[in-house]
Image (cartoon, rainbow, N blue to C red):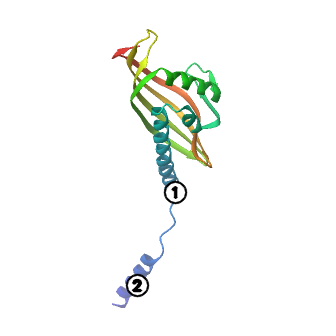
Amino acid sequence: MRVVLMFLAVCAASCARPSAPPSSQTAVAADTSAVRREIEQWYDDNTRAFLAKDVDAIMALRTDDFQAVAPDGRVQDRGAMEHYTIGLLNGIDRWISLNFDIDSLEVSGDLARGVVRQHLIRMALRPDGLVHHVETWVTQDETWRRTPDGWRLQRVDSVRDQRRLVDGQPD
């Protein structure tokens, strides 16, 4: 009986010990989940800015050293991308939908890198001078930097899987 009581006391004592701190792997997963939520909020802000055709709000969500690397390897700085964004928005009659899916995300300190899939649908002016239904898809790598004002897009590269339909037909 005494042995059984001693065994139960040892078990109770071991169960009463505080649990071990979470492993670094658990902490990283929690941090990545929190950053994912923050970047999803960034996408909500970005979508609102595009829907409003507000170039200043769009560019405010990008770092001062923002750059995009085109599929041909050409690097465009923030100024070139602002100019491109103005041209894009000027040709849009109205947005139908903007969808962004963060496929994967890695966080390292104040940088986050993700694979993002975009699907955009809009009514847009085309070279024939008419407004057409335009639907585009792309997958790209994106890097965000945490700033005092929140996450800001720093770089877009590895642009791939581009597809465009105009009035339902490949362009």
Quarter the C terminus occupies: top left
User: Label for residue 27?
Assistant: 1
**Disc 1 element:** helix
Q: Would you say 37 lies left or right of 108 here? A: left
Would you name the residue on which mark 2 appears? 9
Name, please, the residue furthest toward the top: 128
**Disc 2 element:** helix
Residue 27, percent from left and from top: 52, 57
Among the two numbered marks 1 and 2 on one chain, the one whose residue lies closer to the N terminus: 2
Q: Nearer the viewer, residue 154 or 127?
A: 127
Please say if the residues under marks 1 and 2 sit with CB atoms less than 8 Å apart.
no
Residue 2, percent from left and from top: 37, 91
Residue 141, percent from left and from top: 53, 33
The amino acid pointed to by label 1 is: Ala
Determine crowd level at label 2: few under 14, some 14-19, many 20+ residues with C-alpha closer than 10 A: few
Determine the image quadrant of residue 69: top right
Determine crowd level at label 1: few under 14, some 14-19, many 20+ residues with C-alpha closer than 10 A: few
Q: Is 92 situated above or below 110?
A: above
Q: Nearer the viewer, residue 109 or 150?
A: 150
Q: Nearer the viewer, residue 55 or 45?
A: 55
Q: Would you say 111 lies left or right of 34 here? A: right
* Residue at x 49% of width, y 37% of height: 46
Q: Would you say 106 lies left or right of 6 here? A: right
The amino acid pointed to by label 2 is: Ala
Q: Is 17 situated above or below 108?
A: below
Residue 126, percent from left and from top: 44, 14
Name, please, the residue furthest toward the right: 65
Quarter the N terminus occupies: bottom left
* Residue at x 46% of width, y 38% of height: 48
Q: Is 108 situated above or below 127?
A: below
